[in-house]
Image: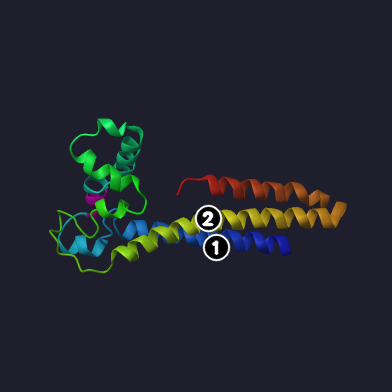
Amino acid sequence: AIISGIIIDTFAEMRSDRKEVLEDLNTSCFVCDIEVVDFEQANHDFQEHIENEHNMWQYVWLKIYLRDKDPKEYKGLELHVAPMLLDYNKAARCMPIKKARAINGNVKDKATLPTLLGKIKKLSSDVTMQSKLADDLKRKIDTFYRESGAAFASDRESFEGIMDELKRYQERPA
């Protein structure tokens, strides 16, 4: 019963964290952090914005492209953007925070650069915390079985199945 409670609590916390991240992704642009409401007020389609204008994966691919390209071969904007984008502490400087052509600057200033960096750090720490919780849960279950011996040997397979499910959940893309 104790193990089941720990497992249920861990899954509930992970589900809650994942829900919070997904809600943030669905209500504001990951790149510029402008909320859906602002796009609606400007009579612009939010989905169009995040798929075409500020597609976060294009920024990821740009960073990979610049990382893999020989810096001696940079041309034009690559010379300007690469040093900032590849340096974690300067990456936010080349992002269009609170800027989108579709809105033309008509955005209520709801966030500042420190707020956005705080969100990124929180997302990163949430992932780290989930991993630590899963490792802690596995250690507790292993300790429980070592201490209880053969009395719960028949339940071990079902708990190993639960642990496998937990591991698949962790490895699943967000």
Q: Is residue 16 above or below residue 66?
A: below
Residue placed at 30% from the left, 63% from the top?
113
State yes or no: residue 48 in magenta. yes
Task: Look at label 1 and name its amino acid.
Answer: Glu
Does 157 sit above or below residue 7? Answer: above
Q: Amino acid at mark 2?
A: Thr
Q: Secondary structure at mark 2?
A: helix
Picture quarter containing residue 105?
Answer: bottom left
- Residue 83: horizontal and vertical position, in percent? 29, 44
- Residue at 22% x, 68% y is 109
Q: Earlier in the sequence, mark 2 or mark 1?
A: 1
Q: Nearer the viewer, residue 162 or 25?
A: 25
The N terminus, quarter of image? bottom right
Q: Which residues are magenta?
A: 46-50
Q: Which residue is mark 2?
A: 128
Q: Position of residue 31 (x, y in %)?
A: 29, 53
